[in-house]
Image: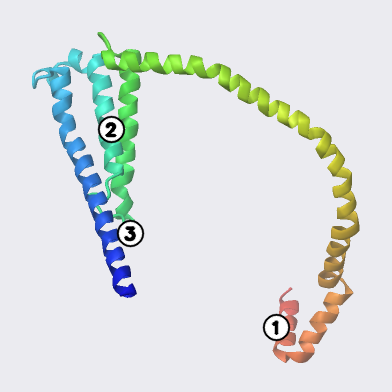
């Protein structure tokens, strides 16, 4: 009965994992598939607009396209099962690397649209940028407090470090240094030569190899 219970629990764990992976796969693939339609419906672009350089250089197009490309690339990288299985040597990670490159391209498009795009920027991006700026301003005092706290902690720890330093030096000189000196004498001094001589006596082949090495030198 105990074994049957363990098997049932294991099967339930596998089934739960498969359900989680399947749900994640379905959600991410649905997101990737819906991005082109969301982009077109949001920007209102038509086929003729994609052949218009002025439209392609607008801030709305560049920023929206960059956001969509970045989201699609990051969603693909998080797919449990992608086009090329990761277990295939060399090729398994190529699609993930390409997705990472696409994510970088998406961020580049956002940057170009923000700084060099023509026309008005998307309202959502302006709101997000304003929130980030406000968050940055709000976090500046916390950053200052954190830096000051670290400096105060270092300053408070200096007396303790200065008090411990002589003890550490004494311990090193009295305990660690003699051990290191003995090891040096054992492996690089007369004791080491005696050790090599004992190896030569116990193993003639070792002596022959040593002689050949000396002749080559």
Quadrant in the picture for the N terminus: bottom left
Position in image of residue 181 (x %, y %): 87, 63
Q: Who is closer to the viewer here, 100 or 167?
A: 167
Q: Residues within 10 Å of mark 3 (few under 14, many from 20)?
A: few
**What residue is at 35 percent from the left and 32 percent from the top?**
104
Which residue is tagged 3?
89
Q: Who is closer to the viewer here, 136 or 68?
A: 136
Judge left or right: residue 148 versus residue 112: right
Position in image of residue 66 (x %, y %): 28, 26
> Cβ–Cβ below 8 Å for labels 1 and 2?
no
**What residue is at 67 percent from the left and 29 percent from the top?**
150
**What residue is at 77 percent from the left and 87 percent from the top?**
200
Which residue is tagged 2?
71
Q: Residues within 10 Å of mark 2 (few under 14, many from 20)?
A: some
Position in image of residue 117 (x %, y %): 29, 13
Tell me which corner region of the image, top left, top right, bottom left or bottom right, holds residue 123: top left
Position in image of residue 45 (x %, y %): 13, 19
**What residue is at 30 percent from the left and 40 percent from the top?**
99
Colour basis: rainbow
Is residue 211 at all visible to an observer of this figure?
Answer: yes
Q: Nearer the viewer, mark 3 or mark 1?
A: 3
Q: Residues within 10 Å of mark 1 (few under 14, many from 20)?
A: few
Tell me which corner region of the image, top left, top right, bottom left or bottom right, holds residue 187: bottom right
Which residue is tagged 1?
209
Regarding mark 2 in the picture, which secondary structure is present there? helix
Residue furthest top in the image? 119
Regarding mark 1 in the picture, which secondary structure is present there? helix
Q: Quick check: 59 above or below 155?
A: above
């Amino acid at each position: 009965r105990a074994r049957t219970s363990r098997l049932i629990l294991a099967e339930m764990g596998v089934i739960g994992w498969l359900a989680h992976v399947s749900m994640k796969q379905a959600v991410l693939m649905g997101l990737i598939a819906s991005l082109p339609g969301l982009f077109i419906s949001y920007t209102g672009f038509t086929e003729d607009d994609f052949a218009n350089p002025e439209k392609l250089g607008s801030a709305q197009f560049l920023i929206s396209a960059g956001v969509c490309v970045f989201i699609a690339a990051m969603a693909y990288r998080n797919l449990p099962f992608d086009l090329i299985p990761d277990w295939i040597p060399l090729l398994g990670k190529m699609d993930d690397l390409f997705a990472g490159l696409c994510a970088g391209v998406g961020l580049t498009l956002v940057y170009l649209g923000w700084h060099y795009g023509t026309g008005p920027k998307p309202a959502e991006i302006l709101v997000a940028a304003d929130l980030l700026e406000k968050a940055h301003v709000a976090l500046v005092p916390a950053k200052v407090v954190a830096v000051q706290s670290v400096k105060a902690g270092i300053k408070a720890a200096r007396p303790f470090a200065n008090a411990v330093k002589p003890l550490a030096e004494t311990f090193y000189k009295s305990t660690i240094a003699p051990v290191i000196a003995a090891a040096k004498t054992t492996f690089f001094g007369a004791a080491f030569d005696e050790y090599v001589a004992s190896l030569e006596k116990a193993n003639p082949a070792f002596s022959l190899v040593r002689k050949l090495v000396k002749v080559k030198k």
